[in-house]
Amino acid sequence: MLARLPMETDIHVVLSMRDDFASICSSFEVLQPVFHDLTMLNPPTGGNLRRALVQPATSCGYRFEDDELVDEILAEVEGERGALPLLAFALACLWDKRDRETGLLTRRAYHDIGGVGGALARHAEATVDSIGVEQIPIVRELFRNLVTAEGTRAVRESVSCE
């Protein structure tokens, strides 16, 4: 249906998806027509990543304390494959600590959340804590199965529970 829309109407469809999901979806025969005219976009880098970081705050009337803070945040995700989702998560945490009086996203708040990696780590720890101490061995085993011995994401086949 999505593939037919541009041909049958004056509508253009923009579908955005992570590359690992795209490769899985393209293996389904019914979805293959959607992937025929696919334009793959590389993740944002450099100035584009900077704009993705700064522009949403600016459009809401906020700004970063200084350019060095922006540089510090970008340096934390430089070269990371999942830079954009990491930034999105950390900035959601930073947004919760924004200075509403001055309209600033501050270095102090950024350090309070632990930076990009710290924000994610704290969230993970809080999630594990909420599961309960008796479940921690199960959680550890699940996490071990999500990565390879080399520390990369393990590819797992989905299993139907029917």
Image: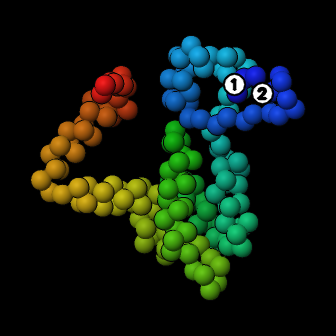
Residue 112 in percent (x, y) is at 42, 72
- Quadrant in which residue 87 is drawn: bottom right
Mark 1, Cα crowd under 10 Å, few <14 / some 14-19 / many 20+, is few
Residue at mark 1: 1
- Quadrant in which residue 114 is drawn: bottom left
Q: Do the residues labelled 2 and 1 touch (CB within 8 Å)?
A: yes
Considering depth in this image, is 140 or 81 the residue closer to the camera? 140
Residue 94 in percent (x, y) is at 52, 67
Residue 54 in percent (x, y) is at 67, 61
Considering depth in this image, is 76 or 121 the residue closer to the camera? 121
Residue shown at the point (12%, 53%) measured from the top left = 134
Q: Residue furthest right?
A: 10
As drawn, the label of residue 5 is 2
Residue shown at the point (67%, 71%) measured from the top left = 63
Looking at the image, is 135 positioned above or below residue 1?
below
Residue 38 in percent (x, y) is at 70, 23
Mark 2 → mark 1, Cα distance in angstroms: 7 Å
Q: Which amino acid does label 2 sit on?
A: Leu
